Image (cartoon, rainbow, N blue to C red):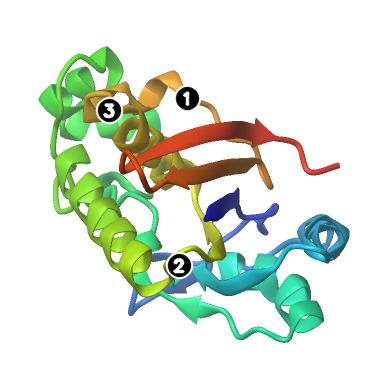
């Protein structure tokens, strides 16, 4: 059982507010669309059982060409959504510092978990990651999956897989279309990291 976890391709800049998500929901840029087409070669020979994407359009757009080639329909799962930064999501750093100085200090220090005002804590994100992992391990026994998500989610996922505190997510960097590959070792019920943030081309 191998899971391929992919960060979405490049997104457009500008305002694309989604009232349902309560955040910006940018589509892929032209470069992002071109890069998503290149992913077909990477996954053409992979026996994927399913493709899971977040509720943000840039993730399913990233997976679209691969899904079409493999004749799979991407499944939207909100548990793959980016960390919810709540009220600070569209603030500048200066606005963040001034409006929520204590949260800003915790955000910069990265020595303990904290809660974004109106958003999530690291522990809350990790809880939905665990829920997703547990469910899909049971649902897709022995099968390979493609999961397309976001920078912060993937960094938080690495903390979960590697057994690190949630606030250590800042120790990881994930590039656009950066690929992480995990293999589940059923006999010891642990994940093996095969590669992290590999550039896809």
Question: Marks 1 and 2: in contact by CB < 8 Å?
Answer: no
Q: Identify the residue under disc 1.
A: 172
Up-down relation of residue 12 to residue 93 (above or below):
below
Is residue 87 visible in the rendered structure shown here? no
Mark found first going from the N terminus, 2 or 1: 2
Given residues 13 and 186, the one toward you in this image is: 186
Residue 54 tag number: 2
Q: Is 128 displayed left or right of 6 in the figure?
A: left
Given residues 58 and 153, the one toward you in this image is: 153
Given residues 156 and 108, the one toward you in this image is: 156
Q: Give the foreground label among 3 and 2.
A: 3
Up-down relation of residue 5 to residue 40 (above or below):
above
Helix, strand or loop at mark 3: loop
Q: Position of residue 75 (x, y in %)?
A: 49, 80
Q: Residue at x 60, y 58 (%)?
A: 14
Q: Quadrant of residue 61?
A: bottom right
């Amino acid at each position: 059982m191998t899971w391929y976890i992919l960060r979405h391709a490049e997104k457009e800049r500008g305002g694309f507010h989604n009232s349902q998500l309560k955040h910006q929901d940018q589509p892929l840029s032209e470069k992002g669309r071109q890069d998503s087409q290149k992913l077909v070669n990477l996954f053409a020979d992979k026996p994927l059982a399913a493709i899971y994407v977040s509720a943000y359009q840039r993730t399913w757009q990233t997976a679209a060409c691969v899904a079409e080639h493999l004749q799979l329909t991407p499944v939207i799962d909100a548990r793959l959504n980016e960390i919810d930064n709540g009220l600070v999501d569209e603030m500048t750093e200066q606005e963040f510092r001034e409006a929520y100085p204590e949260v800003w200090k915790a955000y910069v220090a990265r020595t303990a978990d904290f809660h974004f005002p109106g958003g999530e804590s690291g522990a809350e994100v990790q809880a939905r990651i665990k829920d997703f992992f547990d469910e899909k391990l049971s649902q897709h026994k022995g099968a390979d999956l493609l999961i397309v998500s976001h920078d912060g989610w993937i960094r938080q996922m690495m903390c979960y897989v590697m057994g690190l505190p949630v606030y250590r997510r800042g120790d990881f960097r994930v590039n656009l279309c950066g690929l992480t590959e995990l293999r589940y070792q059923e006999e010891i019920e642990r994940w093996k990291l095969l590669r992290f943030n590999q550039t896809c081309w």
